[in-house]
Amino acid sequence: MTELPPVTEEINDFAVREHRSLWLDAWRRLISNRTAMIGLVVVAVFVLSAVGAHFFWKYDAKMDLNYSAKLLAPNLRTTEKSTQIHIFGTDKLGRDIFRRVVHGGWNSLRVGLVAVGISLSIGGLLGLLAGFFESTDLNRRERTILMAALGLGLGALPAWIARQPFQAVLFGLLGVASSLLHGKTSKKSSPRLVEYGLAGALIGGTSGFLVGPMVALVCGLVGLSIGLLLARPVGGKVFSSIVMRVMDIILSFPSYLLAIAIVAFLGPGLEKGMIAIGVVGIPIYARLARSAVLSVTQKEYVLAAHSVGEGHGRILFKHIVPNILSPIIVQATMGLANAILSAAALGFLGLGAIPPEPEWGAMLGDSYKYLSSGAWWAVLFPGLAIMFSVLGFNLLGDGLRDALDPKMRV
Amino acid sequence: MGRYILRRLLSVIPTLIGVTLVIFLFQRLIPGDPAVAMLGEHANAENVARIREQFGLDKPAFLDRDALAEGDLPGFFDSQYVRYFGRLLQFDLGESIHRRIPIAETLKERFPATVELSLLAMSIALVVGIPIGILSASRRNSFLDGATMIGSLVGVSVPIFWLGIMEIMFFAVIMKWLPSGSRLSSGIVIKPITNLLLLDSLLTGNWVGFKDAFLHILMPAISLATIPTAIITRMTRSSMLDVLQEDYIRTASAKGLSERIVLFRHALKNAFLPVITIIGIQAGTLLAGAVLTETIFSWPGIGKWVYDSILGRDYPIVQGVTLLIAIIFLVVNLLVDLSYALLDPRISYE
Amino acid sequence: MKRNTFYTLFALLIMASMLLAACASPSEPAATQAPGETEPPVVPAETKDTFIFGRGADSVQLDPALVTDGESFRVTGQVLDSLYAFEQGTTNPVPSLAECTPNADASVWSCKLREGVKFHDGTDFNADAVIFNFERWRFTDNPYHYPSQVFEYYEAMWGGFDDASLITAVNKIDDLNVEFVLSTPMAPFLANLAMDMFAISSPAAIQAAGEAYGTPTGGCVGTGPYKFVSWQEGTEIKLVANEDYWGEKPKIKNIIIRVIPDDSARFLALQAGDIDALEQAVVEDLATAEADKNLQVLTRPALNTSYLAFNFKIKEFQDIKVREAVAHAIDKQGLISNFFGKYGTVATNFLPPLLLGHNPDIQDWTYDPELSKSLLAEAGFPDGLSEVTVAEDVTDADGNVLYTAGQKIPLRLYYMPVTRFYFPAAKEVGEGMAANLNAAGFKVELYLEGDWPTYLGGRRNGTLMGLYLLGWGGDNGDPDNFLGYFYATGAEPIKREGWYQNADLAAILQEAVTLPDPEARAALYRQAEQMLHDDVARIWLGHNNTPLILSAAVQGYVPQPVGAENYEFVWFSN
């Protein structure tokens, strides 16, 4: 939708262009995009005012109380009634709304960054691994770790039933054994199944006898099935489908509801809100990272890296991550917008910042009941602040998408 | 094809079980004892013990290993989760803690209110979003296109609770055109058939009731529709643009077919696929957004109900409603996947 | 085939949208027409026969014996009658379903029941019905005294259940005469009988509904002027006039009691004519209402007290200097005039001025932050107080330790999650008070402890570890219902009082409740108030003359200081 930047001068210094990095290129495209620039300016105003206010315009919300100035309409000149200038008016406790909106920005910014950080670091990592191992076979070491973890995890059930922690360890070892022995023996799968099934039943059953016959029976049965599961060393696909299934489960709860439930569990407060919003966002990044990884794993440079025998970690972080960064950056920018919006919703419902800490959603929620007495300013300005900051991040994300991936232009 | 559908259907089951597990776990993890919550101010050790026994809260959460150690195999499985799951299989959602009413009963009243609101919001989103999206794609870079893009971005950025308040302030307080909340004015009676008031009033030919119900639903539906409308508009536009750049469209245009035929015959069909996915995802967003919208407009739906119940620690309600919403979400996504398979020739069904 | 499938689906989708659009289109003219109307779109033009009351929260239960909240009594007060009632607008008990006379030492009361009264279900009101109700409340092994049910008020007003009950027997003399035998003489006996929680339900209805009696499905059945019709949870309760009522026939046919939680939305609904009356509005709306000629404001005489309480299991609060510092830090006048408006008065006593035993001689603490700071310094906190120490283990109802002795916790100010008739703006008062305290050197943190039942549970178990806001509304107009409930002896009162113990005070209060002479009682209560003040046991904040806003057309609505208002006298003028 945007006009292409003029290309004439770029043709002249072709050699320079060779050296220009992808990022510089993207930056050029970004600043030539008008909507993105508007977004950038809005975001910059928001960030600078919030950070500036936090460090240079101290505000002690806990002491702020002035009955003589309560519920004053916005004024640009001092009058008899309001001896001070309140460009956004004042609230029920006579606090200057402009000041609280600006300081509320600091809180919103923190919530946004931390929440996106949580979702991105957990979701992104899970998605990265899921996508990578879905298309790449595990190497020996990874398989051993996965099988050991699987054995430990599955073994926890009989161990818990029989109150014998060592059972879990035994099953973990069984997992290690199965992954090590895999390939060394060329047996058909049916004898393997029998072997491991028996081993599992024995581990579970015999130690279960120490507690009681019925426990032995149940643990034996559980052990048998664990053994059968461990008999066939798993591939990366299992890991990927477990992760994605868990993501499906999180995703099938409506986001606000899940966030509310998490806050109800953790208790109110800004920090708890950050965690709740962060957790709710995990599946989005996991899905995005996974599909982005899948789209590059079959690219020539990744296949080449595999064939020269580079380690998985190196391939992942040297070749794959840099190439999937752009959709993730775009999503993270938009995710910031979303996190600010969700935080405001939580605040509005009374589950956000602890009063009297300024927070946009809570300011809205508290002033809402003074609407019928005509105090529109107490509701209008925090709402506008939410809207413009969210809009800024959305515009920026949109522009980034255009800039980082010309093909994905929307 | 049949196998694909079957496999897709079966894949829902583990997710569903996972959902029940999470819902159950949440109840266990949220601080506060349900038995104490149930008794409120009356809680004392004796009463609490009695309530625990009555509701099976004295049982262990998942499996009873102590029973097993005593050789009691059925007792091993007699746990809160197993009981909960067993009741679910019989479509028994339990009863609310504070008022002791079966949840299914209240659901019958409350669920239609949310369904009505969500359906209306969704149809507003479709009726507004799709045509505008198509139009703006066909006039790329026009003023209309620019306005659409900005408008849709503003749409996803507006906090809907704030929009709702602003609507109330303007339409209800200042102009007094629309009522500020609830589903119906007092004194208006609509014979319940489906409990969807708009539909019921139409079916019974109750025009006074219809007008009243419509005026009440208008503001909440518009607030709720804001985000889906914006997203559907964007999605329609962008997938239309993608399709319009394909070779077969260029060929069709080159053949001299009129713009309208190219647009509606060739482009629309293919542009529709991603839009359907978005519609599915938005169905979930609508149910989530209902929590806020219903709170602001005192709409007696499930969103407000479950929010109140979370704060009041009425776990059976939270569990029941969350499960219902999760199931709806899963079913809608299933339908989207299936319709995708049905519509897109490139997807194979092995 | 694929092509066909696509078009079928597309056509279906379009049809669905059309259908829904069609749903919308016929009313479009209506919507565009609406701007022309000046009236809100509610127009049943016939004579009004429905009185709609808007309130902030739903009833908890409609079996009044099980609950303590006014929102439940607001409904049961219309459906059920007690043996005695409070005279309109006063706290005097007057005969209702019965007329009782005491013996010489007021330990046996003979009651003559009203003749010819029937419950709404057609069964007779008689001695058996009275005895059924009292025995159900009293005996924990009564088949209708369900294990999950706790008759809290019976316990509070009559000393306990089973053998602990002050009512040792309710004897049937004949069908219309019963006698109550008390273990000790009791001054407020008739006032207790008049309380809404001791209203008589139909035994047949309780037997039929079992545990569901009082729930939305079971409803309630009494002898009152209105009959229960339906209860849509969280939304509204409908009542209809009882044509066979024994007293004055109700003037209005239908009553709807509707829940609109938000103060602002409720007031808007009243202005729009959606409801006829409401309770609880923000101060600014009250000013609007007074100026509006379509509305009237009535006030309920203040029989309530809001307060700031200390948890005495906090070591620092055991020092009277710290408590005095808190008392001098709070700008009561500012809080009351800004958040209660002109309906509130500053409190110096726990007992409101209307009540017997109110002590007008108590000199309130001055508002003096500087004095607070110096008091704090004297108590050993020259740099202010931001962290407090737990003095003893605090456990929950289960015996789990929540706070261990010696633990340091931040200084918290718990605020109520709801507004109540004694506390019109709890959150704002909390914020204002926190600012007051911070200005005087206390670094308090506002703290929200769950929803309302959770908050009350925390109070009851003494687990609100810090300063907390709360209030109390009298239920029968007797001073014992205030002071005795909190400060007479026993483990429970000590807990719900934030672990405040004062044996001398308890002795005085126990003596006061048995004295027949009002003047002698008043003297004792005045003494008790002075003791509480001298000890800075709690900081009384205000008494609220709870305002009710009604449409100007509503007539005959008399605010009751205690108990439910009587809707049978309400009518509409045109």
Image (spheres, helix red, strand yellow):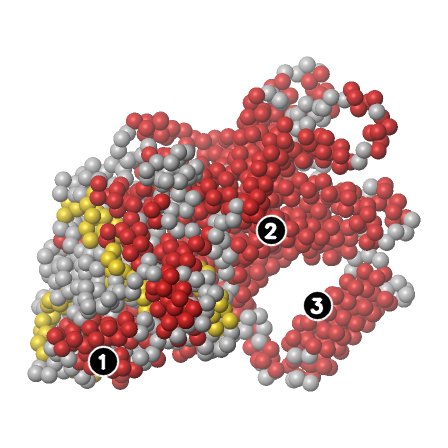
Crowding at dot 3, Cα within 10 Å, few <14 / some 14-19 / many 20+, comes out as some
- Give, as a three-letter code, the residue at label 1: Ile
Residue for point 75% across, 77% down = A203
Label 3 element class: helix
Residue B298 image position (x, y, % from top left):
38, 47
Disc 1 sits on a residue from what chain?
C
Q: Is B225 rendered above or below residue B6? A: above
- Give, as a three-letter code, the residue at label 2: Ala
- Kindly tell me whether residue C52 is visible in this rendering: no
> Picture quarter containing residue C313?
bottom left
Look at mark 1 in the image and give the residue it sits on: C508
Residue A223 image position (x, y, % from top left):
72, 73
Residue for point 85% across, 66% down = A180
Label 1 element class: helix
- Asked if residue C443 lies left or right of residue A27, the reply is left
Residue C187 image position (x, y, % from top left):
15, 77
- Give, as a three-letter code, the residue at label 3: Gly
Disc 1 versus disc 3: distance between alpha carbons? 65 Å
Residue B337 image position (x, y, % from top left):
63, 43
Disc 2 sits on a residue from what chain?
A
Nearer the observer, disc 2 or disc 3?
A: 2
**The one of C442 and C338 positioned closer to us in this rendering:** C442
The numbered mark, 2 or 3, whose residue comes first in the sequence reads 2
Crowding at dot 2, Cα within 10 Å, few <14 / some 14-19 / many 20+, comes out as many
Nearer the observer, disc 1 or disc 3?
A: 1
